[in-house]
Amino acid sequence: IKEGLAYNYGSIANIYLELGDVDSAIEYFNKSLEEAQNEQIIIVISEVYKGLADSYVKKNNFKEAYKYLALHNGTREKLNNEKIGQRIAELEIQYETKRKDSENEILKRANAVQRNYFIFSVVLALVIVIILYSRYSYSKKAQKQLEELNATKDKLFSIIGHDLKNPFGTLINFSEMLMEDYLELTDEEKITYIHMINEASQTGHEILDNLLQWSKTQSGKLEFLPKKVELNEIVEANIALLKSAASHKGIEIFSAVNGGTEVFADKVMLKTVFRNLIGNAIKFSHKGGTIKIDSKSNGEFVEIVVSDNGVGMSKAAKEKLFNPTVFNSTAGTANEQGTGLGLLLCKEFVEKNGGKIWVESEEGKGSDFKFTIPIGN
């Protein structure tokens, strides 16, 4: 153990000397000298004298440097004695080996410390980046949700204050005219007024129904009860419901959906999707137009399309259709009014049932609204 200390102190002293820390080098050379003298390790004593001489030269203390150089030379003379010549060679080899081992061990530990420090620094930096990014993402998401809520709130107030007011205004006006002037009106005028009242009633009902369902979806109170549903039954029920509105514009609606086609979906939501898509097709079809509902199997889904040969839409209009922050409402070909809620409901309900919805349209050539629903197996 003592012999090892002499070598280790000498190795540390040499490292300090190479680093330019002369005082620390002298301190460890003296420690090495003390241990070497106690154990009579001549080779270490000689190397320590040489190291001390070099150290004092760097300190410009030539007196001490000369002293230790003389001691080094004297020790070397002893080592050069023929009687211990072979021992000198062995001792030098042992010394160099132990010195290198000691230096390597010290350097290895220093490298390990540096490596651990680097790893710690990298991990800490990554943690900080992740925390900052998470906070930024949360802030952006919260801001987006707030913008959507504000847009929804503003639009709902607009619907209540304007869009819902119009059909009820029409109902009141024409019903009053019928009441007050009934005897003076011709049969043709009466029928016209009744048609106007009917259309206003249907429009008001549609707006109110969409409004109520939309508010339920936003508050999370709308029940979701998926089950096997026969697709053709829902399509035919909606065609019958909207037949009057279509007939008024001379529009023909027909279904090519195969009987027996089943899907797995919430029946109420699916009815709402068809009612809005078919109603939309009627709204934007010209008099004498045609609307077709068709379906086909597509893997684990049924793909449904509601097609019309109406006005179609531009690329810019298509991009706004399913955006919850943009309530895009356009008057129909007969100046029918809407709220823009219908297609947003369609998107929410289709996605709630595990499908997706999109539109293919060309301005002046009509639109194909397509959506998928899981097959009923």
Image: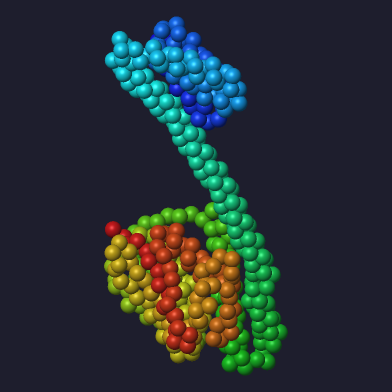
Quadrant where the image shows the N terminus: top left
Q: Is 280 placed above or below 20 here?
A: below
Q: Is 350 placed above or below 171 here?
A: above
Identity of the residue drawn at 38% across and 25% down: 100
Q: Is 342 placed above or below 145 here?
A: below
169 horizontally vs 370: left or right? right
Percent coordinates x, y for residue 38 in the rendering: 45, 6
**Residue that extends furthest to the top in the rendered view of this protein:** 38
Percent coordinates x, y for residue 274 in the rendering: 44, 71
Total tally of numbered discs in the picture = 0
Q: Quadrant of residue 354?
A: bottom left
Identity of the residue drawn at 48% across and 27% down: 15
Identity of the residue drawn at 48% across and 34% down: 114
Q: Which one is nearer the viewer's eye here, 20 or 312?
A: 20
| Chosen colour scheme | rainbow
Residue 39 visible? The answer is yes
Q: Quadrant of residue 43?
A: top left
Q: Quadrant of residue 112?
A: top left
Percent coordinates x, y for residue 58 in the rendering: 57, 27
Q: Which one is nearer the viewer's eye here, 54 or 233?
A: 54
Q: Which one is nearer the viewer's eye here, 152 or 93?
A: 93
**Residue that extends furthest to the right in the rendered view of this protein:** 180
Identity of the residue drawn at 45% across and 58% down: 352
Q: Is 102 placed above or below 191 here?
A: above
